[in-house]
Image (cartoon, rainbow, N blue to C red):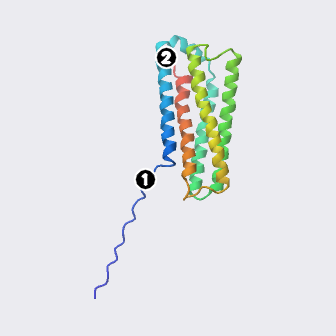
Amino acid sequence: MHAAKHTLSPSLPAEPRLAGDLAIWIFILAELLAFGLFFAAYAFARAHDPALFAPEQEALNRNAGAINTALLLTASYFVVRAVHAAEAGRGRQGARWLLAALGCAGGFVVIKLAEYVAAFNAGISLSSSTFHMFYLSLTFFHFMHVLLGMVILGALWLNARRGRYGPRDMNGIESGAAYWHMVDLVWLVLFPLVYVIR
């Protein structure tokens, strides 16, 4: 009688999956397209009148823009840590990272509002010049996305505190993280395009 042969099936790698909801990725791609068209229009207008754009661009507070860049990058780092904590089953620790990300986003909002107040006090409006029309429109469009991102981060924080996220339930936190990274990515294009590149 021959001994039965036991063959061990090799463990297959997990199939790649989309992090978060498909719907949030469709929304993100639509938003990136809108920003891309906005950026292209700005670049086109600037190329046709660099003499108008240069001095008004020079007057922007690049230090404020740089600090806001650091705040958004730091917030994204904290969001990544929150996702990793949830994956490891440490949802409450993830909540603390999300709260830190919210703090950075709040700092961005305060600095951007100070920039707007300074601009309006100087008599700058959408009709002041082509540059200021683009500057105010682009940055305010992004600003509204930051505010929505803060609402999403706040909801994620509440859910993480309640232990909603874990290795078996990552969809919500991954979707929120994807949106926040989109907000960060857009600023990483907007800041050098509007504040820095001459």
**Where is residue 35 drawn, in percent x and y?**
51, 29
Residue 8 appears in the picture as rendered: yes
**Where is residue 31 drawn, in percent x and y?**
51, 34
Element under label 1? loop
Type of amino acid at the residue the image marks with label 1: Pro
Q: Residue furthest top?
A: 51
Mark on residue 16?
A: 1
- Alpha-carbon distance for marks 2 and 1? 42 Å
The residue singled out by tag 2 in the image is: 45
Camera-nearest residue between 16 and 20: 20
> In this picture, is 40 found above or below 96?
above
**Where is residue 11 drawn, in percent x and y?**
40, 65
Q: Residue furthest left?
A: 1
The quadrant the N terminus occupies is: bottom left
**Residue drawn at point x = 69 percent, y = 18 percent:** 120
Camera-nearest residue between 143 and 67: 143
Type of amino acid at the residue the image marks with label 2: Ala
Residue density around tag 2, few if under 14, some if 14–19, many if 20 or more, within 10 Å:
some
**Residue drawn at point x = 63 percent, y = 44 percent:** 153
Residue 122 is left or right of residue 53, and the answer is right
Element under label 2? helix
Q: Residue furthest bottom?
A: 1
